[in-house]
Amino acid sequence: MTNKPEQEPGSSESQVKSRKHRSPNYPVIGLQKATELTKVLYDAYKRNQVPVELVHQKWSYKAHGGVGNQTVAALKSYDLIDVDGSGKNRTIKISERAYKILENHPDRKRLLQESALKPLVYQELWEQYGAGALPDNEIIRHYLKFDRNFNPSSIDGIIGDFRDTFSFVELNIGDKIVAHEEGGSSHNAVDSNETPPIGFGNKPSVPPIMPPKGLNMATDTFTLGEGTITFQYPISLSEESFDDLEAWMKLQLKKIQRSIITAPGDDPSTNEG
């Protein structure tokens, strides 16, 4: 478990400077530990809404403390819990995914593998290195530090939890994530055969869902020859959320680039300029 130690309000200059380098969002624990903590909540409260203070206490953490809040965020990033409300008024509930995992649903392995790819940083690392053998930690460390601007003090923990998570869910190098339709909703599944990468399954075209009136959302559209792209986003974003969105969009562009169809005889690798 790689929880960051809770810090009392500090006053030294070095502490203030260290806080200025915030890493992008990442789960502070691996999926195996997150699943164990989810089971603790399920055994105690089943699928009821639980005040976040009781959740922290059930895990033997200080109520409303940093470690408890980070752990809640980690479980949410794996889609193991649903969180309602904000701040100290939050309530926690076991998600449908977690319920199926804990009750040994026939699709338990797939559900866990999907959860492993829910955190953006894990999805990025899998996109970056999952097609072949995972490289030495030093290469991943360099990527996280210089390409993704993670705080160096958090990187080793991220790498360790990343490796532990994919070992736990038995997601093998070369496995691809493909989209399937199930009961009218899509999900990701692992397939080691030659199948389209994540996000490019044979989904039917679905009209974009417009945000209800009154919500603090904006919608932009961009028309291409092949169709219209629709993008929805909150009108107000924190700096941290913007950084996460920017990283996510870069990842989506890498995926979309794979769908480029070149004209017969064209070889993009020979283009000059």
Image: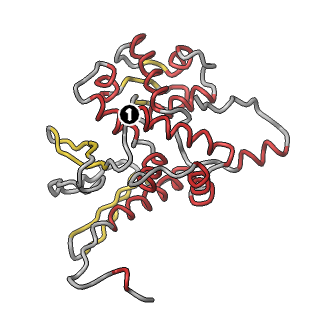
Q: Which of the pair 133/30 is nearer the observer?
A: 133
- Residue 253 lies left or right of residue 9; in this view the side is left
Quadrant for the C terminus in the image: bottom left
Image: 25 above or below 43: below
Residue at horizontal 45%, vertical 24%?
91
Residue 39 image position (x, y, % from top left): 41, 18
Which residue of the protein is positioned furthest toward the right in this rendering? 12
Instruction: Answer few, some or many: residues within 10 Å of disc 1's Cα (few below 14, many 20 plus, some between 14 and 19).
Output: some
Q: Residue 143's image quarter? A: bottom right
Q: Report the residue marked by disc 1.
A: 169
Which sits in the foreground, 238 or 249?
249
Foreground residue among 48 and 236: 48
> Could you tell me which residue is drawn at 49 percent across and 26 percent down?
33
How far across and down, in percent of the image, does residue 11 sit?
A: 83, 38
Q: Residue 235: image x %, image y %? A: 45, 55
Residue 270 location in percent, x, y?
37, 85
Total marks placed: 1
